[in-house]
Amino acid sequence: MDLIIGSHVGYNKNDGLLGSVKEALTYNSNTFMFYTGAPQNTFRLPIDKNITEEAKALMKENNIDINNVIIHAPYIINLANRANMDFSVDFLKKEIRRSEELGISKIVLHPGSHVGLGVEIGLQNIIDGLNMVIESDMKPIICLETMAGKGSELGKTFEEIKTIIDGVKLNNKLMVCLDTCHMNDAGYDMSKFDEVLEEFDRIIGIERIGCVHINDSKNPINSHKDRHENIGFGTIGFDTLSNIIYNPKLKDVPKILETPYIDKEYPPYKHEIKMIRDNIFNSNLLDEVREDYR
């Protein structure tokens, strides 16, 4: 099975998408995910078309299908909170336009937090916001991310995501991003992933899965905490994550690592991707990453 696997990578003002591709290649990835600017603010630089074309050529040379590359929308967007709605709608529209400029076809979006308004009102706000954002000629697909349920986060159950999808008029523009850490922390037993996938298929439809974030978790199931851990070093474990990654029903779905840097300094992705491709847990991975960067 030819895995479509990569990680989160950087995107900076000097070399834009080209720098992202180059970083992904150092990890031996065949896909990747990036923010088009800092996720915690609205500052965005114009996209350099020449650099973008260079990036596309480099992807083609290295068998990275641009259709498997993902943009992550900034987490300052919160469609669930009516007070921020105008800002969130406007900024998400701008991110969609940037995605179109870059030629990226999928944007992962955190559904939002209701911040005290309640689940029902929060979900309706997300629906209203997406109905304002999504247009029939919009090229990228928005992938709603499954959330851990920390605080007042919405999208923590398949039913909540289904409610959003059903309420959006142009919901052919919506898919779902499964996050293994978030699902564990939300209460889904990832060691029984076939059953979880069957439940997803029954409620939403497996054809809606646009990408998978592969993360171990620092916390036990149903903790509603959302703290990612390196592959095999958390409560989900290597074997369970490997079973998810190699699930034949997800063969054509991009898998993206968002695991933490070692010592908050060293990216683990090259070593984690090798471990996943070898399909053997490497208990020395953390030390090997440290050694690699010293």
Image (tube, rainbow, N blue to C red):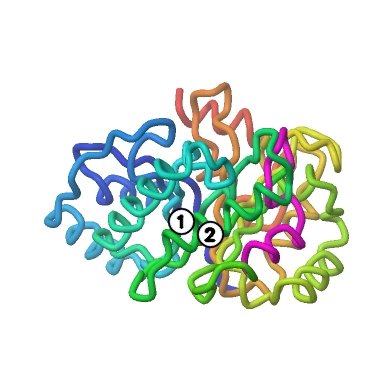
Kind of residue at disc 1: Ser
Tell me whether circle 2 and circle 1 mark residues in contact (CB < 8 Å).
yes
Quarter assignment of residue 87: top left
Camera sees residue 214? yes
Q: Residues within 10 Å of mark 1 (few under 14, many from 20)?
A: many
Kind of residue at disc 2: Ile
Residue 207, percent across and down? 63, 77
Residue 213, percent across and down? 61, 53
Residue 138, percent across and down? 35, 70
Q: Residue at x 45, y 22 (%)?
A: 294
Judging by the rendered image, the residue that carries numbered circle 2 is 5
Q: Nearer the viewer, residue 39 or 260?
A: 39
Quarter assignment of residue 167: bottom right
**N-term-proximal mark, 2 vs 1:** 2
Q: Is residue 146 above or below residue 149?
A: below
Q: Secondary structure at mark 2?
A: strand
Question: Distance from label 2 to label 1 (Cα)?
Answer: 6 Å
Quarter assignment of residue 191: bottom right
Q: Is residue 247 above or below residue 45?
A: below
Residue 86, percent across and down? 41, 44
Q: Is residue 294 above or below residue 20?
A: above
Q: Secondary structure at mark 1?
A: loop
- Indicate left or right for 266 with 121 as reference: left
* Residue range of the region highlighted in magenta in the rendering: 149-165
Q: Nearer the viewer, residue 199 or 275?
A: 199
Disc on res. 177: none
- Whether 162 is among the magenta residues is yes
Judging by the rendered image, the residue that carries numbered circle 1 is 29
